[in-house]
Image (spheres, helix red, strand yellow):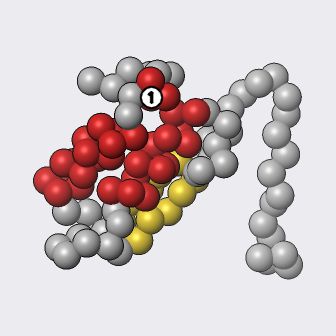
Amino acid sequence: NLRDNQLDQVSLLKITKSLEAIINKLNPEVIYTHSESDLNIDHQIVHRAVMTACRPLPGQTVKEIYSFEVIIDIGVPVVLPSKTPDNI
């Protein structure tokens, strides 16, 4: 019941508790979440909630957390560095 682009109007505790319930149900070992430096405020909040929900506690199954950035189309071309055998 969390609305898009409105997470800044919801307490971090409520978001974290929602994620904890999902994590406790699924028992994942790996979590992928948004980067804390993402420009989208919802993504920043989700990152903070995930990090809190996955804090080291007895019975915690999460062993790894990976974050990613979402590239949005704002009408400007984005050039990503290419990986070749010479620069990997």
**Image position, residue 37 (x, y; %):** 66, 48
Question: Is 70 above or below relative to 50?
Answer: above
- At mark 1, the secondary structure is helix
Quadrant location, the N terminus: top left
Q: Which quarter of the figure has residue 53?
A: bottom left
Compared with 73, 62 (above or below) is below
Closest to the observer: 28 or 15? 15
Relative image position of residue 21 (x, y in whole percent) = 18, 48
Residue shown at 45%/28% (left/top)?
7
32 sits to left or right of 14: right
Percent of width and height locating residue 54: 34, 62
In this rendering, the answer to whether 62 lies above or below 15 is below
> Residue visible at 44% across and 65% down?
65
Of residues 60 and 73, which is closer to you in this image?
60
How many numbered marks, from 0 up? 1
Left or right side of 47 for 63:
left
From the viewer's perspective, tell me whether residue 39 is left or right of residue 79.
left
Q: Is residue 22 above or below residue 56?
A: above
Quarter of the figure that contains the C terminus: bottom right
Residue to which mark 1 is pinned: 7
How crowded pointer 1 is (Cα within 10 Å; few <14, some 14-19, many 20+) is rated as some
- Left/right placement of residue 2 relative to residue 26 reads right
> Which residue is situated farthest in the left direction here?
25
User: Residue sitting at 39 percent across and 40 percent down?
Assistant: 12
Q: Residue at x 35, y 66 (%)?
A: 55
Q: Please name the amino acid that badge 1 sits on.
A: Leu
The image quadrant that residue 3 belongs to is top left
